[in-house]
Image (cartoon, helix red, strand yellow):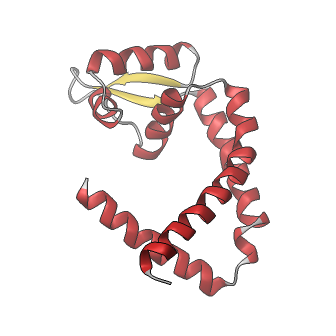
Amino acid sequence: MDPMTLLHEAERFSEDIKLVFVKEYQKILEKYELSSKQSIIVSLVKQRGNPTMGDIAVAIDATPSAASQFIKKLEANKYVKREINVNNRRETFVILAEKGKSLFSELELADKKIFEKYFLKLPTKDIVEYHRILKALHTIVTSSS
């Protein structure tokens, strides 16, 4: 098969797999009643470890005012909280609050379940190769955007 055909087939496999995984996570996400944009913001806070309001605005491609409105709603629902940077009082960090921490605890348990149920059925050499390929693709994608 030519590379393009292989990629199209791989994409179909990936989409089928994502649908199964989404079902695993859907119950958790529905429980927490987050919109997709809110979910992205909470994930950003978790991944980036206390980003600034400006970082979030850039990441979600929104104005600082719009980002602030999203954060305000998440803060009211106890997913995140704001902290003023003690070294630069004009800068505000966004950190996970209790409900945000709880969400990620549940998602981490779901990850573990998925890894055990599906990924760990693969031989170790395939897991290593999967990691290598995703890392290489990640480098390509993040360096070109």
State the image coordinates of residue 141 (x, y, percent, origin top left).
33, 60
Q: Position of residue 20 (x, y in %)?
A: 72, 53
Residue at the spot 72% in from the left edge and 73% down from the top edge: 120
Q: Quadrant of the rendered structure where residue 33 is? A: top right
Q: Nearer the viewer, residue 6 or 52?
A: 6
Could one spot residue 96 in this view of the protein?
no
> In the displayed structure, does residue 87 sit left or right of residue 28?
left
**Residue 46: % across, % down:** 49, 41
Identify the residue shown where x is 54% and y is 12%: 76
Instruction: Residue 109: give x, y in percent of width and height.
Output: 72, 50
Vertical position of residue 60 compared to residue 107: above or below: above
Tell whether 106 sits left or right of 64. Answer: right
Marker count (numbered): 0
Q: Residue at x 56, y 25 (%)?
A: 35
Locate residue 129 relative to residue 103 in the image: left or right. left
Residue at point 31% right, 58% down?
142
- Asked whether residue 3 appears in the rendered view, the answer is yes
